Amino acid sequence: MRWGSYVAVGDSFTEGMDDAYPDGTYRGWADLVASRLAAEAGPDFGYANLAIRGRLFPNIVAEQVPAALDMKPDLISFAAGGNDVLRRTFDADTFVPRFDTVVGELRAGGADVILFRFADVMARLPGQRLVAPRMALLTQAVGEVAERHGALLVDLYADDTYLNPMLWSTDRLHLSAAGHRRVAAQVLTALGVGCDEEWLIVPPRPAPTPWLAARAADLRWAGQHLAPWIKRRLTGRSSGDLITAKRPVLGPVTPN
């Protein structure tokens, strides 16, 4: 086992929304990965998760990347940009070279780095005409950066299983518990570490919803999730404004 420490960097995807522990805090794929690595490495294994929901790429780079580098971990996961492509101000000409530079900095510190091509969420969300080309650009850029810097690439975008709505929470943007387990299994596979095969089991797809019922569900979703998101954008707020990292320093993790 070549990793004695692991730091997770990112936004809600890495924080673990919406895979809740009994106390209401979030677990997610990164906690699952850390638990499995700890089982392999032993009690001295250290894990930190700096991810905070709603964080944009510049904030992640300014706040989390320096902290991660200071910890000098053996392994870093870096998942950023998903929130940025949803903003009208997204500038690919600025984002892509900065992403490349940051990954180079993470690799220069000596850590193995995990990057992600995000699963396709646009089939369930509005704004496809605007956002889908940006997601395609981000997907291509992440692959090229991973190859350039020798990072490990976890390609969720290529996995059509994520088209199953059972892998997503009711907000249609964050993964369900089953979705997080699948991501954890794919990360561990990329690392060459075995995992519980049940993590790859996918719940059956739900039966097709009648048209009227589907439109009613869309309206409920818009009121419960889309409208608050738009309000936060208009008021300059974020879902993570009052949130701090759940594991801000390296510490032991209890294997599951």
Image (cartoon, rainbow, N blue to C red):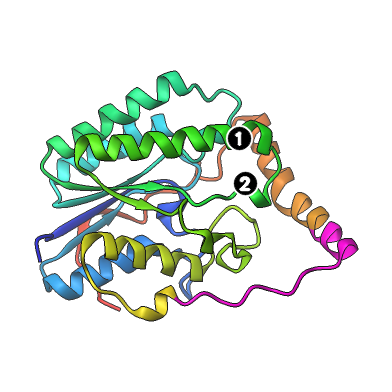
How many marks can you see? 2
Q: State the residue at coordinates (29%, 29%).
A: 100
Residue for badge 1:
131
Residue 150 lies in quadrant? top left
Left or right of 167? Residue 42 is left
Task: Name the amino acid type tagged 1.
Answer: Val
x, y (%) of residue 18? 53, 62
Q: Was residue 214 drawn as part of the magenta stretch in this picture?
A: yes
The span from disc 2 to disc 1 (Cα, nearest Å) is 8 Å
Residue 87 lies in quadrant? top right
Residue ranking furthest to the top? 93
| Residue 89 position (above or below residue 154) | above
Q: Can the viewer see residue 158 in this picture? A: yes
Q: Can the viewer see residue 27 in this picture? A: no
Residue for badge 2:
122
| Residue 164 position (above or below residue 233) | below
x, y (%) of residue 121? 58, 50
Task: Name the amino acid type tagged 2.
Answer: Met
Q: State the residue at coordinates (23%, 40%).
A: 67
Callout 1: helix, strand or loop?
helix
Quadrant (top left, top right, bottom left, bottom right) of the C terminus: bottom left
Left or right of 14? Residue 164 is right
Badge 2: residue crowd in 10 Å (few <14, some 14–19, many ≥20): some
**Residue range corresponding to the magenta coloring:** 201-217
